């Protein structure tokens, strides 16, 4: 079956549920065992104490609605296993907690989503994990290797995470996934325990598949394109059975699981992910072109507009199946002009988040990345005149007219 079909049909048999074509929502916190022996065995498997046949025990560990969406996401992405969470941040935190402890290292690309940066600095640093950032861009692999080499002696016996977010939020800069995977393979040969984790939220499962490039784990804020309607907060981690079972162990332990209704919403939304993301991308291409030619716009950062001779364009063509629907652009002027523009958009919603059916527009420096330090902002060119736009599925002419009339007000 093709992926468009799998996300509508796998993991659920209507005939087991009175013929209900859509899955019911399993609003139960706990599950009846057939026997005491079965209860004992299911619990040991759920806690990771034994391998064997798993079954439902308690909805902090699993639930039929989790299983359906997890199976469909795994098939869509070509992963052995998936774990869903109560948010993207829950997915990131639980995954990292499964692999790092005090004394370990996270090397990460800069910028990342502001909340992730905050998590690294305010949580992981404080628990004794060194979090070291490297500027995102075409030279990230070289810069990352340099940083790793300078710390080589300290890495023996430690766990190392190479954490990438590509394209980066909010500046759409890409990192060469294959080159980061090569760094991991070299370190593994030297006996260092290392994993590559990629946040694939910006391109979603349709336009980029980092598992095909052999990263260990892919993370999503499923709030974005997977949920797709700005009505659910959720997250996902995808990878090998072994890795995801460790991640699920942490999820069950600290309770970062989602709930059955959110899992049901994700299942509903996955059915349309291909057509939503395709339409959003087609709109974004036209809007990026319009903005790039507007006299009040300094420049637009969108993969299709990268300089065709640049390394960024080569990376884009190598690892992405399309340009996606997020664009960043710089208004001529400063914060005053950017805010005047934002205060005058009407159809596009002035709101954080992205990937919904509606177009969402925001000011990264004042909003999604407000907790990021000055140096990082400068490095990532997150400036007073930068705007991030997540293009929705509305008619593209209506979006362009909205942007045009707001630009006219500056
Ligand atoms: C790239 C990226 N990763 C992770 C997150 C966090 O996801 P959530 O808000 O679902 O916790 C976000 C949120 O905007 C994001 O943009």
Image (cartoon, rainbow, N blue to C red):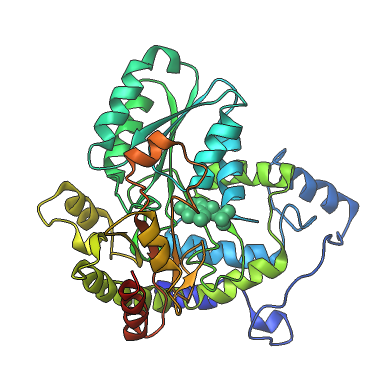
Is residue 220 visible in this depiction of the protein?
Answer: no
Is residue 97 visible in this depiction of the protein?
Answer: yes
The relative height of residue 75 versus residue 129 in the rendered view (above or below) is below
Q: Single out the residue that lies furthest toward the top.
A: 153
Residue located at (22% from left, 50% from top): 315
Q: Single out the residue that lies furthest toward the left.
A: 309
Closer to us: 331 or 163: 331
Residue located at (47% from left, 67% from top): 225
Image x and y of residue 202, in percent: 40, 58
Image x and y of residue 316, in percent: 24, 55
Image x and y of residue 344, in percent: 43, 73
Residue located at (32% from left, 19% from top): 149
Specify the quadrant that holds the N terminus.
bottom left
Closer to us: 36 or 389: 389
Specify the quadrant that holds the C terminus.
bottom left
Closer to us: 395 or 340: 340
In screen coordinates, is 190 left or right of 42? left
The relative height of residue 321 versus residue 190 in the rendered view (above or below) is below
Image x and y of residue 50, in percent: 71, 40
Closer to us: 187 or 94: 94
């Amino acid at each position: 079956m093709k992926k468009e079909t799998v996300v509508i049909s796998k993991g659920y048999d209507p005939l087991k549920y009175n013929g209900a074509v859509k899955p019911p929502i399993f609003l139960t916190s706990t599950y009846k065992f057939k026997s005491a022996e079965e209860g004992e065995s299911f619990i040991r498997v759920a806690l990771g104490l034994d391998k064997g046949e798993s079954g439902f025990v308690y909805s902090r560990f699993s639930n039929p609605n989790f299983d359906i969406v997890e199976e469909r996401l795994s098939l869509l992405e070509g992963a052995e296993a998936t774990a869903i969470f109560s948010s993207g941040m829950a997915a990131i935190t639980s995954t990292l907690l499964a692999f790092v402890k005090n004394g370990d290292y996270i090397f990460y690309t800069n910028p990342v989503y502001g909340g992730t940066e905050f998590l690294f600095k305010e949580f992981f640093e404080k628990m004794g994990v060194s979090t070291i950032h490297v500027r995102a861009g075409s030279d990230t692999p070289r810069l990352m290797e340099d940083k790793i080499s300078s710390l080589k002696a300290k890495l023996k016996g430690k766990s190392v995470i190479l954490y990438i977010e590509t394209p980066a939020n909010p500046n759409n800069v890409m990192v060469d996934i294959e080159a980061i995977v090569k760094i991991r393979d070299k370190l593994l040969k030297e006996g260092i325990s290392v994993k590559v984790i990629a946040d694939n939220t910006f391109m979603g499962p349709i336009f980029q598949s980092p598992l095909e490039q052999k990263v260990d784990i892919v993370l999503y804020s499923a709030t974005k394109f997977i949920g797709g309607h700005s009505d659910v907060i959720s997250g996902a981690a995808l990878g090998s059975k072994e890795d995801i079972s460790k991640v699920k162990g942490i999820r069950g332990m600290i309770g970062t699981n989602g709930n059955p209704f959110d899992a049901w919403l994700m299942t509903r939304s996955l059915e349309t992910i291909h057509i939503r993301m395709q339409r959003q991308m087609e709109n974004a291409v036209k809007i990026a072109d319009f903005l790039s030619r507007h006299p009040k716009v300094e420049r637009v950062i969108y993969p299709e507009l990268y300089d065709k001779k640049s390394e960024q364009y080569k990376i884009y063509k190598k690892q992405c199946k399309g340009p996606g629907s997020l664009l960043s652009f710089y208004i001529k002027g400063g914060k005053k002009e950017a805010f005047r523009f934002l205060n005058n958009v009407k159809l596009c919603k002035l709101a954080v988040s992205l990937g919904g059916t509606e177009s969402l527009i925001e000011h990264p420096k004042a909003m999604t990345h407000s907790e990021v330090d000055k140096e990082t902002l400068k490095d990532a060119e997150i400036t007073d005149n930068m705007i991030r736009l997540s293009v929705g599925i509305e008619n593209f002419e209506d979006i362009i007219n909205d942007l045009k009339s707001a630009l006219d007000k500056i």
